[in-house]
Image (spheres, rainbow, N blue to C red):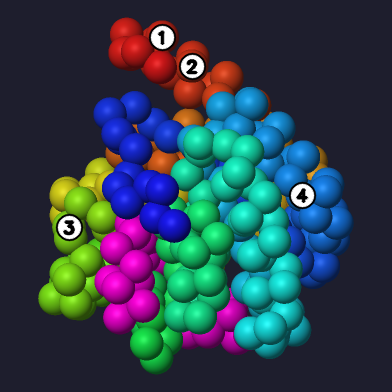
Amino acid sequence: MQRHPSLPSLDRPRIMGILNLTPDSFSDGGLWTDPDLALRHALAMVQAGADFIDIGGESTRPGAAPVSLQQELDRVIPVIERLAGETAAMISVDTSKPEVMRAAVTAGAGMVNDVFALRQEGAVEAAAGLGVPVCLMHMQGEPRRMQEKPGYDDVVEEVGSFLAQRAAVCEAAGISANQIVLDPGFGFGKTLQHNLDLLRGLPLLARAGYPLLVGISRKSMLGAITGRETGDRVAASVAAALLAVQGGAAIVRVHDVAETADALKLLAAFTDKPY
Ligand code: 8Y7
């Protein structure tokens, strides 16, 4: 339990590889529902340069079926247990449920990634009690209806103040500032224009002083820009990850780890930094 009470050093950009244990995720749903294949895929992502593996058992896709607590536990816990025994990479659990957070950390997860920014009943207390780092993501509305009519006066300002507020709530509950990562939540209650404004506004969001995590990989904003289906968005995803890191993202959450690692190596060489 709690093999990784703190974040790895973020002096260079880090890659979070996505492992979806759901039958209905938008891009890779159903691919890794077999635990053996899931484990193999996770280890391949670590081999390819992932510093984090984000494991989720409930799809947040608009219209996705809700998942019961038991179902979510059954999907993620066995895989976390086995993966924890086989890698030193940080295992992050993508969940909003306090019970799943606790079971996942007991099983070997070292971080909580919550698209609800710990707003569910008991979630802040659970995460604080576990003592692990947390990623707090912005979302407007709730997954089922978030894309119906997203609206902001100033998306960067509003997302920034929401995240600062959630960080303050977490710190008040005993989560230390250096255990907090913030995420503008690309695609979660945002139009294409909102997403582009946020990508452009990353340097402003970074000024709050918390590391930023960005997840754009294969998302529909890339489909809107390129006209390509999810599986054909790898190049656009890599470009987006590179733009995010240049804008100040500390961690990029991606499906295509090897390709992203190559791009970040190129950026490191270009900026004369170590990778
Ligand atoms: C994000 C996320 C998803 C994201 C963080 C997808 C779970 C949709 N997107 N978590 N989760 N940030 N922190 O594309 O952008 O994988 S689900």
Residue extent of the magenta highlight:
125-152
Q: Position of residue 243 (x, y in %)?
A: 44, 35
Cβ(mark 3) to ligand 1 < 8 Å?
no
Which residue is drawn at the image coordinates 39% and 91% (left, top)?
A: 121
Q: Is residue 250 above or below residue 172?
A: above
Is the residue under label 1 in contact with that under label 2 (CB below 8 Å)?
yes
Q: Is residue 4 above or below residue 100?
A: above
Q: Position of residue 80 (x, y in %)?
A: 62, 56
Image-based side of 31 in relation to 275, left or right: right
Report the quarter where the N terminus lies.
Answer: bottom left
Q: Indicate which label's residue lies in the foreground, 1 or 4.
A: 4
Which residue is drawn at the image coordinates 62% and 55% (left, top)?
A: 81
Q: Position of residue 41 (x, y in %)?
A: 75, 41
Which residue is drawn at the image coordinates 41% and 9% (left, top)?
A: 269
Q: Secondary structure at mark 1?
A: helix
Label 3 or label 2, whichever comes before in sequence order: 3
Residue type for callout 3: Ala
Tell me the residue that label 4 is attached to: 38
Tell me the residue that label 1 is attached to: 269
Residue 265's disc number: 2
Residue type for callout 2: Lys
Report the residue that reaches farthest toward the bottom: 121
Image-based side of 91 in relation to 118, left or right: right
| Disc 3 packing (10 Å; few <14; some 14–19; many ≥20) | some
| Disc 1 packing (10 Å; few <14; some 14–19; many ≥20) | few
Tell me the residue that label 3 is attached to: 177
Cβ(mark 4) to ligand 1 < 8 Å?
no
Distance from Cα at disc 1 to Cα at disc 4 = 33 Å
* Residue 116 visible in the picture: yes
Q: Is residue 131 magenta?
A: yes
Residue type for callout 4: Ala
